[in-house]
Image (spheres, rainbow, N blue to C red):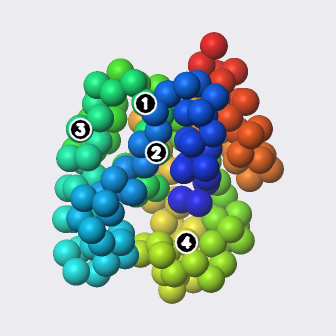
């Protein structure tokens, strides 16, 4: 969460001459609602189902794809990601950096109104799942988006 997935994904796609897909944006466009509204009206399980469906639509696409931070919370989606032949990069961000980057942001349903301790617990509950599906991980706390893109390009060559 708040690791720069969309920003980095857009930059990487441009540098690689590939299309960019943001799964959250694609879901919002299809549902004609914000992620926050989807969570509020239909719940997280419904959103996770949409997320997995949208991922499968791009399974064979040659594109840079950005997912939401909670994409790894369901077993079905983790299994899908592990089976997918794509390179999966985990942009690892500390809870402290997350809190700093999103101070005042009310658009993150699972982080909204959470204490720093609850955010830390959320990160800890996801860490092993991120590591299990990722081909590579990059610590993002001290890097600019362009530096992250350079690291990704180096990993891909």
Q: Earlier in the sequence, mark 3 or mark 2?
A: 3
CB atoms at circles 4 and 1 under 8 Å apart? no
Few, some or many residues within 10 Å of mark 2 (<14, 14–19, 20+): many
| Pointer 1 residue | 63
- Quadrant, the C terminus: top right
| Pointer 3 residue | 57
Few, some or many residues within 10 Å of mark 3 (<14, 14–19, 20+): few
Few, some or many residues within 10 Å of mark 1 (<14, 14–19, 20+): some
Secondary structure of residue under mark 4:
helix
x, y (%) of residue 54? Answer: 26, 46
Q: From the viewer's perspective, is residue 154 above or below residue 126?
A: above
Secondary structure of residue under mark 1:
loop
Q: Residue at x 63, y 72 (%)?
A: 102
Distance in Å between CA atoms under marks 3 and 2: 13 Å
| Residue 119: mark | 4
x, y (%) of residue 128? Answer: 47, 46
| Pointer 2 residue | 66
Q: Nearer the viewer, residue 51 or 32?
A: 32
Distance in Å between CA atoms under marks 4 and 2: 21 Å
Indicate the quadrant where residue 57 lies. Answer: top left
> Which of label 4 and label 2 is nearer to you?
2
Q: Residue at x 35, y 21 (%)?
A: 85
Q: Residue at x 58, y 78 (%)?
A: 105
Q: Earlier in the sequence, mark 4 or mark 3?
A: 3
Q: Earlier in the sequence, mark 1 or mark 3?
A: 3
């Amino acid at each position: 969460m708040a690791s720069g997935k969309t920003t980095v994904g857009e930059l990487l796609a441009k540098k690689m001459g590939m299309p960019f897909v943001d799964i959250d944006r694609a879901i919002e466009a299809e549902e004609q609602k914000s992620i926050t509204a989807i969570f509020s009206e239909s719940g997280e399980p419904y959103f996770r189902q949409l997320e997995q469906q949208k991922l499968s639509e791009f399974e064979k696409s040659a594109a840079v794809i950005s997912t939401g931070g909670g994409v790894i919370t369901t077993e079905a989606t983790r299994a899908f990601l592990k089976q997918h032949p794509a390179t999966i990069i985990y942009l690892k961000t500390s809870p402290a950096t997350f809190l700093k980057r999103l101070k005042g942001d009310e658009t993150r349903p699972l982080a909204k109104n959470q204490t720093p301790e609850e955010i830390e617990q959320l990160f800890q509950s996801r860490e092993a799942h991120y590591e299990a599906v990722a081909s590579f991980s990059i610590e993002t706390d001290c890097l600019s988006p362009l530096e992250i893109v350079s690291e990704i390009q180096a990993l891909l060559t």
